[in-house]
Amino acid sequence: MHDGYVAADAGAAPKRSDAIDALRGVAALSVVVFHCWLYASVNPNRPVRHTTADFALFETRIGLILFFVVSGFLLYGPFARAVASDGAPPSVRRYALRRVARILPAYYAALAGAVLLVAAASATPGARPVGARDLPLFLFFGQNYSGTTIMRLNPVTWTLCIEAAFYVMLPVFGLVVYRLARSHRWIEPLAIAALVALGIGWAHLASGGNASLPVIKALPAFLPYFAVGMMCAVAVRSGGPGAAGRLGLVALGAGVVAANGVWHATGGAASVSWLGTLTDLPAAVGFGLIVIAASSDAGRGRVSVALRPLAAVGVVSYGLYLWHVPLLLVLRGAGVMPRNTLAVFAVVVPIALVVATASWVFIERPALRWTRRPRPDRARPAAARRGDAARAAHSAT
């Protein structure tokens, strides 16, 4: 959904962060575990939680919250650093080109695969194929805006619609904040906090009025999660904590995330009706603390040997996210999927990782490299470009 890159400043070339990639790996595997539990159920459309294990596995769904937090952190980071340094704002053209290259090629390949795989498994419980008339909505991330397509075909793509809407909103928000905050720095945190307030208000109104799924699954309801990541970008732009501080933030963040799960599992979240769909906001804050620790200058780009496999999964996490549900449906339809969640995970993850790696090697990485190619005129020496400009001016006189 986003890149695992962190830039030193608004104009610097991005550098891959293993620590952020490890978090993306955790997020992706968490979502896969949730869907392994879901699609191993007798009826994936109406899963039932009976045991403690069921409640624990259900809470792995919050991997998507981590994705939103990391997206807000990485994508707002260049704007936050530009505000702090009084430097030039990020190039919207470069930003848009990279977002398109990062998301669309792999998404379209997975969309074609989902059409074929879900059609082959159309009689499988949990499969939700769509008709040819509805497919154009998926081409433009419009499936969230129709009751006949939302959560269908490849259900996980509803989050990509949220991400795509955020991608469109962010440069507008970032440039407005950049211009206002250069003279009044307090405007930046206030504007980000306003996103949280907007999300809470939207979710409260949606939850209290029997709103439709497209309203509940709209960007405003998820803005607080992105805003947490954006606030993290503001917090770390002047450096991060030392080793002891990073460990403390990870421990505290993990504790808050775990408490969020317990709160949901015991029914406490359901009693906070005014918060609506934002009862995972504590988890977002916990993830934010972990992101701050992972992105600090002292530890940037370095993870322990034990975490390197997670970082490797994070690199291919977009493909893993896109392909795992159609593969689960095909395996269940073929009668080869076990009914134990961990066994399902052991079967589907190796297959999904192979497909995701192929997506990264043959589609995603080449597309990203294409965006980094210098434009022909900029690849020439500066003196030659000045000579061209002088000759053009001379010929015009």
Image (tube, helix red, strand yellow):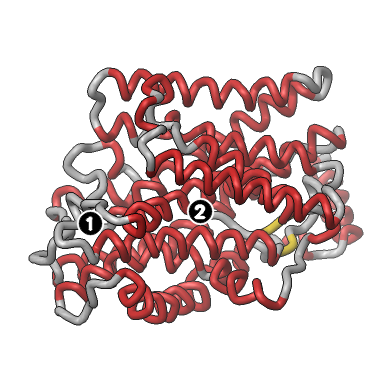
Q: Is residue 212 above or below residue 10?
A: above
Q: Quadrant location of residue 235? A: top right
Q: Which residue is mark 1?
A: 153
Q: Which mark is residue 100?
A: 2
Secondary structure of the residue carrying numbered label 2: helix
**Between 108 and 348, the one nearer to me in the picture:** 348
Residue 366 image point, x, y percent = 56, 72
Question: The residue under label 2 is which amino acid type?
Answer: Val
**Between 100 and 301, the one nearer to me in the picture:** 301
Using residue 85 as the reference point, say whether residue 343 is left or right of it: left
Q: Quadrant location of residue 247? A: bottom right
**Mark 1 or mark 2: whose residue is earlier in sequence:** 2
Q: Residue at x 12, y 54 (%)?
A: 131
Q: Residue at x 67, y 65 (%)?
A: 373
Q: Is residue 233 visible?
A: yes
Q: Residue at x 51, y 33 (%)?
A: 223
On the rendered image, what quadrant is the C terminus found in? top right
Q: Is residue 312 above or below residue 15?
A: below
Question: The residue under label 1 is which amino acid type?
Answer: Leu
Q: Residue at x 69, y 25 (%)?
A: 177
**Between 139 and 62, the one nearer to me in the picture:** 62
Instruction: Tell us which disc is closer to us: 1 or 2.
Output: 1
